[in-house]
């Protein structure tokens, strides 16, 4: 299939800060593509350039064949956007919010009723059409925003942290709606998130961003398979001493301390657990608990950066400053 998005050497600088640093990637049409990384990693800045809200400092990007610099109007007409921050009019009903959007985008009058009904059914809000948005829950508002973003039949839908601030059950529901929209509408979906486990379930391809650079890309399975083997998580009273002992073993690929545990990457983990326990006992290290699992995308991030994604979000103020710059100091719309 052709690519819906082509990016080559895209860079965005704010003074001495490179929010996006020489990124190149392509997104195949009809796929769900995830941009994963901590707050402040450059995800939102990248999206802001792709939707023409910010001009790149250098590099090129084409959306649906249109250059983001030279053909910005054509780009905007062919995309939909759902912002992280709410952008609905709470005083209007769901129907009024959607009708206003269709009027702004010039959706033909004879098609409006059909599109509205079809999308509201997909996101499960048909019975809420005449309810004021201020009475909606956070999850309902997000679903309405996603439906609104598709009313003008865009070829690409950008979702910036679509489930942030929602409870786990509501987040799971949003992911289901996103997958359904992709399947039924064949729309290319590009989403930013820092929920690695959820992106693992819904995205066909992903790119992990940290410090404005893409550090890894591919399908979730491919990225996890690059690590290989199993992850043994150990809680013990030895800390750094445990890591020193473990890394001397030839069959240990890596041993990294995180959140009170040591994550040990090995092949055939079920065979290695008794050997590790015997080693700890030999050196008088008390083991509190041990567990075995397959590598996750969190482990991929840890492998490439040396820290977990939650640790990379340690400076929320810096992340917020970067986000404000990316969206133009609170600017909304196209």
Image: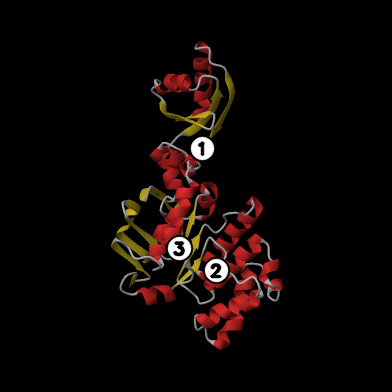
Q: Residues within 10 Å of mark 3 (few under 14, many from 20)?
A: few
Front: mark 2 or 3: 3
Q: Is residue 17 left or right of residue 187?
A: left
User: Label for residue 22?
Assistant: none
Residue 102, above or below 171:
below
Q: Outermost residue toward the bottom?
A: 110
Evaluate if marks 2 and 3 touch, with contact meaning CB atoms under 8 Å apart: no
**Mark 2 crowd level (few <14, some 14–19, many ≥20, 10 Å Cα):** few
Give the CA separation, mark 1 to mark 3: 42 Å
Label 3: state its secondary structure.
loop
The answer to whether one can see residue 15 in this image is yes
Query: Which residue is at a point 41% across and 25% down the rendered structure image?
Result: 251
Question: Looking at the image, is 104 positioned above or below residue 44?
Answer: below
Residue 228 picture location, percent across and down? 43, 37
Indicate which disc, 1 or 3, sits on the residue closer to the N terminus. Answer: 1
Q: Which residue is mark 3?
A: 329
The residue that label 1 is drawn on is 294
Name which of mark 2 and mark 3 comes first in the sequence. Answer: 2
| Residue 39 is at least partly visible in this image | no
Give the camera-side residue of 1 and 18.
18
Please give the residue where the numbered disc 2 appears in the rendered image: 184
**In the rendered structure, are the residues bearing label 1 and label 2 in contact, judged by CB atoms less than 8 Å apart?**
no
Q: How many marks?
A: 3
CA gap between label 2 and label 3 equals 35 Å
Q: Earlier in the sequence, mark 1 or mark 2?
A: 2
Is 90 situated above or below 322? below
Q: Nearer the viewer, residue 90 or 43?
A: 90
| Residue occupying the point 41% across, 38% down | 303
């Amino acid at each position: 299939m052709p690519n819906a998005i082509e990016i080559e050497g895209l860079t965005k600088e704010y003074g001495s800060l490179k929010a996006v640093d020489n990124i190149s990637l392509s997104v195949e049409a009809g796929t769900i593509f995830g941009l994963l990384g901590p707050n402040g990693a450059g995800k939102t800045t990248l999206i802001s350039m792709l939707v023409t809200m910010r001009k790149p400092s250098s590099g090129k990007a084409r959306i649906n064949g249109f250059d983001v610099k030279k053909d910005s109007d054509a780009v905007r007409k062919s995309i939909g956007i759902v912002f992280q921050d709410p952008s609905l009019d709470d005083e209007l009903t769901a129907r009024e919010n959607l009708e206003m959007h269709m009027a702004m985008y010039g959706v033909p009058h004879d098609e409006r009723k059909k599109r509205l009904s079809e999308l509201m059914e997909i996101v499960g809000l048909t019975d809420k059409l005449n309810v004021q948005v201020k009475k909606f829950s956070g999850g309902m508002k997000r679903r309405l925003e996603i439906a609104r973003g598709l009313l003008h039949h865009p070829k690409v839908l950008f979702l910036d942290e679509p489930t942030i601030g929602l409870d786990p059950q509501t987040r799971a529901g949003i992911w289901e709606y996103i997958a359904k929209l992709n399947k039924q509408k064949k729309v290319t979906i590009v989403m930013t998130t820092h929920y690695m486990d959820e992106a693992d379930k819904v995205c066909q391809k992903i790119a992990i961003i940290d410090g404005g650079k893409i550090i890894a890309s591919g399908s979730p399975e491919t990225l996890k398979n690059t690590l290989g083997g199993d992850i043994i998580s150990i809680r013990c009273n030895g800390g750094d001493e445990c890591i020193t002992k473990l890394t001397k073993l030839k069959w240990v690929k890596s041993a990294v301390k995180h959140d009170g545990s040591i994550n040990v990457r090995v092949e055939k983990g079920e065979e290695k657990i008794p050997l590790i326990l015997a080693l700890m006992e030999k050196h008088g290290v008390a083991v509190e608990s041990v567990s075995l699992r397959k590598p996750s995308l969190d482990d991929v991030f840890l492998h490439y950066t040396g820290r977990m994604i939650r640790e990379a979000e340690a400076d929320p103020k810096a992340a917020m400053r970067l986000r404000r710059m990316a969206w133009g100091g609170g600017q909304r719309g196209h």
